[in-house]
Amino acid sequence: MNDLMWDERLGISTESVDYSLEDSENYGYDPTPYFVLEELVKLDLLDSEDVVVDYGCGSGRVGFFLQSQVGCRVIGIDHSPKLLEGAHENLERYDGDGNIEFVCSKAEDYCPIEANRFYLFNPFSTRVFRKVLDRIGESVKKNPREILIFFYYSTIEYKLYLPTEPRLELVKSVGFDAEAINSLSDGRLDVYRFQSV
Ligand SMILES: C[S@@+](CC[C@H](N)C(=O)[O-])C[C@H]1O[C@@H](n2cnc3c(N)ncnc32)[C@H](O)[C@@H]1O
């Protein structure tokens, strides 16, 4: 099923890209291909008890898909009021059980204490990501729990950085051919376990 068909099935609209707030640290909106999300679900690392945060959720595709396929609770966080307006419109139209919320915030300022799974698709620079890891670390100190981070990316910036980050232990990795994800370059979905150091 292609991306437009998935949007239609879920009753949402998430295809339109938006780079209006993009700068050197905070990247614009471009949705994860549904194909990647289907592969993510097949990894069997998510279940209905999980609370998933989509850091940089845009109009909410990841949350709607995971909630519909796994039944987990999802919190989408984005700094763009305009994109969140679209996410809320999608929530009104969405056919599922609605265990989804959207929060307007900088990701580096907010880590829900109950969240145990985090998803990121190229939302911001590695400098911002380090601050996000600081927030996750503080939250794990207050509420100890196992944290998995799902990272979908294709940029050289993250390819170089992720293997050097001592707070991340690689659990699983899935590679995607450029053609399969309708992109100019190959992509990767890496799953990391967060470890306090
Ligand atoms: C590549 S899109 C990914 C959208 C969605 N997660 C998905 O995979 O379909 C990146 C998103 O991150 C958001 N973003 C960028 N910097 C941010 C920040 N510091 N805090 C929160 N959201 C941010 C952008 O507005 C954009 O919607």
Image: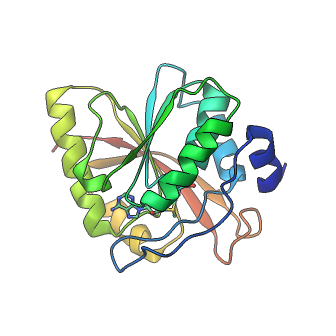
Relative to residue 158, is residue 150 depicted above or below? above
Q: Is residue 197 in view from this perspective?
A: yes
Relative to residue 72, is residue 147 depicted above or below? below
Of residues 95 and 56, the one nearer the viewer is 95
| Residue 88 placement, left or right of 126 | right
Of residues 192 and 46, the one nearer the viewer is 46
- Residue 137: percent from left, percent from top: 20, 42
Name the colour scheme: rainbow
Residue 144's image quarter? top left
Q: Is residue 196 in view from this perspective?
A: no
For the image shown, how many numbered marks are present on the structure? 0
Relative to residue 2, is residue 159 depicted above or below? below
- Residue 80: percent from left, percent from top: 42, 61
Quadrant housing the C terminus: top left
Question: Which image quarter has ligand 1?
Answer: bottom left
Residue shown at 53% from the left, 29% from the top: 46
Residue shown at 26% from the left, 46% from the top: 110
| Residue 187 placement, left or right of 6 | left
Residue 180's image quarter? bottom right
Residue shown at 59% from the left, 24% from the top: 71
Of residues 40 and 107, the one nearer the viewer is 107
Residue lying at the far top in this picture: please name it: 49
Residue shown at 61% from the left, 48% from the top: 61
- Residue 29: percent from left, percent from top: 53, 66
Residue 130's image quarter? bottom left
